[in-house]
Image: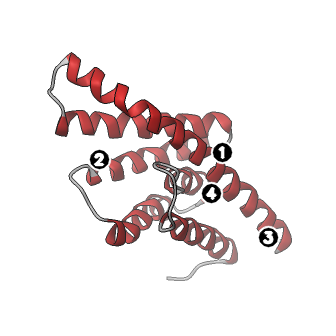
Amino acid sequence: MKFNKKEIVLLSFVIVAVLVRLLPHPPNVAPITAVALFAGTQFSKKHWAILMPLLAMLFTDLFLGFSLITPIVYLAFIGITSLGFVLKKMNLGSVLLSSLLFFVVTNLGVWLLHYPLTPTGFASCFTLAIPFFGYSILGDLFFSAALLYGYRFAMLRLRLA
């Protein structure tokens, strides 16, 4: 496995984001949604783009723990990376769309696994998740900006852009 300089810079930013997930943080303020979107927009090799957020989650989940919802969370990140393939850029709209995709997919999973499969159960699940959605949006905006602008700065500094 050989990486060029651009790919090494990309990987280093992903590694830092992964390590940040292991630090104490408010609920849902984590870098993995940003990593998934960033990977989908920046990695030229699609298999690496898909693997980056999944490996990040797998590595950190070894320390933080797995749950019944874990496969659905991983599926949401595959969806976000795929969104990056389609949109090809990180901006306010793509970050908010990624946040919404994660919110909908994971809360559908929570509803299917932990709530009555009724309209009332659905409404309860999504209503109780709304406060966490705000935290997710804040974290996704912050980490997306940090990844994107940090990466651009590094590429200019290293004269790779």
**What residue is disc 2 on?**
72
* Image-based side of 75 in relation to 155, left or right: left
Label 1 element class: loop
**What residue is disc 1 on?**
90
Q: Is residue 21 above or below residue 26?
A: below
CA–CA distance in space, label 1 to label 3: 19 Å
CA–CA distance in space, label 1 to label 2: 23 Å
* Image-based side of 148 in relation to 47, left or right: right
Q: Which amino acid does label 4 sit on?
A: Gln
Nearer-N-terminus badge (2/4)? 4
Q: In this view, does 139 lie above or below 2?
A: above
Q: Is any atom of residue 150 visible in this view?
A: yes
Q: Which amino acid does label 2 sit on?
A: Ile
**What residue is disc 4 on?**
42
Between circles 1 and 3, the one closer to the viewer is: 1
Q: Which amino acid does label 3 sit on?
A: Leu
